[in-house]
Amino acid sequence: MPADDFVPGILLGSLAALVGGALVSESCRRRAFLRMLLPGLLLWRFGVFLFLVLWALPYYAEGRADAIAYHIKGLEAATAIRAGAWDRLRWEFGTPAFVIWTGLLYAPFGGNLTALYFVSMFVGLGAAISLYKAFALFGAPRQTRVYGLMMFFLPSYSMWTSIHGKDSWVGLGLGLSAHGYGLWLRGKAAKGVARLAAGMLVILVFRPHIAFLVAVAFLVSQVLFYGTAKAASWVQGTLTLVVLAAMLLGVGHLAKGFVGLQEVSVGAALARNDVGARGNAYGGSAVEYRPALSVTEVIRGLPAGIVKVLFRPFLWEAHNFNAALAAVENAWLVLFSLRRLGSLGRLVKHLIRQPYWTFSTALAIELVLVYSSTTNLGLLSRMRAQLLPFFLVPLVGFEDARCCRVVPGRVPHPSGYPNAVNKPSGLNL
């Protein structure tokens, strides 16, 4: 750490420890399982922090890792913010917005990249805790513990949500959105809407296209569940659908501009997808790319694309230490998925009975389809951090049908829908 960075690093790191530590401790206070895991969680995340700072950051430094670019541009943004020169900042979604956010973190004390990684350690941990709490609202105790252990200790998820970049903050946004939706489904409307709105705002600012996919998943889950509603609840259910549809249109308009679509058509989408795929086909992690010129070709290439998104690089494709770590985790994910194929037979039966399972499954499918054309396995390993939390929900949750079965007279749905979910036995985990 350079001498001129030492004091800013200590100040920013201390603030992160105080605020992040307090928020994490409060999140774990009422859940025995989290209280038991908290020391191990902090130790694991600190180990990931050391790995990133001492190994990953120097390894990628020559390639100008995103975090280094954010650090350099964040210093410039902090200078502009302190000078009140707001016109020197780029007020756009995505990377420019994250540069401004980095500048805001730097403005009070100064810049230090190591301290930013320390901040991100708590951001990633907050994302994992939020996802666990969302699953615990509906999952059976054993499944909830399994899901929680994966979110807390899965290496790739821990790593990519602990790096200073859009991945960590979007991960937190996804966790808050999922938990907020779960709370809303459980009848805690005020808390649920507040968390959902905060999560969607974070995702929208940094990755509008992901916010659009989340909004689609919300709408899909409510449309499927709407079909089971009683006549008396149709008014409130219809109002919910109208609000979600309006949110989808608004977010979709912003996402369209963000990804550079000139028009909403199959041809424009395929052309934009081709540009993105060619732009990512670089480095030792690049894979063979064949442009899809029609919807038929897209469908034909989906099986290979899905396998690529979920399970590559394979063990024999690892060409360096970092790729080998990803390949080992992917091999485990293949085995874990194969062991639970039998339980997925309950998927269709229970989707319309539990909107949170539907939301997670729909979002996982959307992300797999969007990422299936990615031509860089290293980039896919990073993107998978957004996908895995929702891909694992059906793999873990549908193993036990009891967590989704219909039990008359138990826990009515907050929107007036029938009693389609069990009493949440995992709330005190």
Image (cartoon, rainbow, N blue to C red):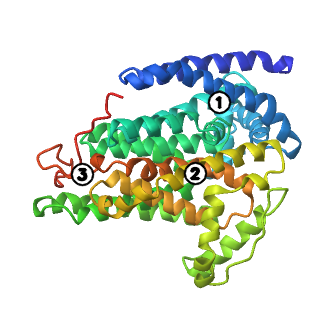
Task: Identify the residue under disc 1.
Answer: 105
Mark positioned earlier in the residue sequence (3 or 2): 2
Instruction: Report, in whole angstroms, how far the alpha carbon at label 2 lies from the one at label 1.
Output: 42 Å
Q: Amino acid at mark 2?
A: Leu
Instruction: Pick the residue in front: 262 or 66.
Output: 66
What is the number of the mark on residue 196? Answer: none
Callout 1 touching callout 3 (CB < 8 Å): no
Q: Where does the image place residue 368, in percent across and percent down from the top left?
A: 56, 61
Give the quarter of the figure containing the C terminus. Answer: top left
Describe the element under mark 1 as helix, strand or loop: helix
Task: Identify the residue under disc 2.
Answer: 335
Callout 3 touching callout 2 (CB < 8 Å): no
Q: Going 85% across and 17% down the picture, which residue do you hit? A: 3
Give the quarter of the figure containing the N terminus. Answer: top right
Label 2 Cα crowd, 10 Å radius (few <14 / some 14-19 / many 20+):
few
| Residue 330 vertical position relative to residue 70 in the rendered view, above or below | below
Q: Amino acid at mark 3?
A: Arg
Residue 327 left/right relative to 126: right
Label 1 Cα crowd, 10 Å radius (few <14 / some 14-19 / many 20+):
some
Q: Going 40% across and 55% down the picture, which residue do you hit? A: 343
Residue 303 left/right relative to 2: left
Nearer to us: label 3 or label 2: 2
What is the number of the mark on residue 405? Answer: 3
Instruction: Pick the residue in front: 395 or 221.
Output: 395
Q: Amino acid at mark 1?
A: Leu
Q: Where does the image place residue 201, in percent across and percent down from the top left?
A: 48, 46
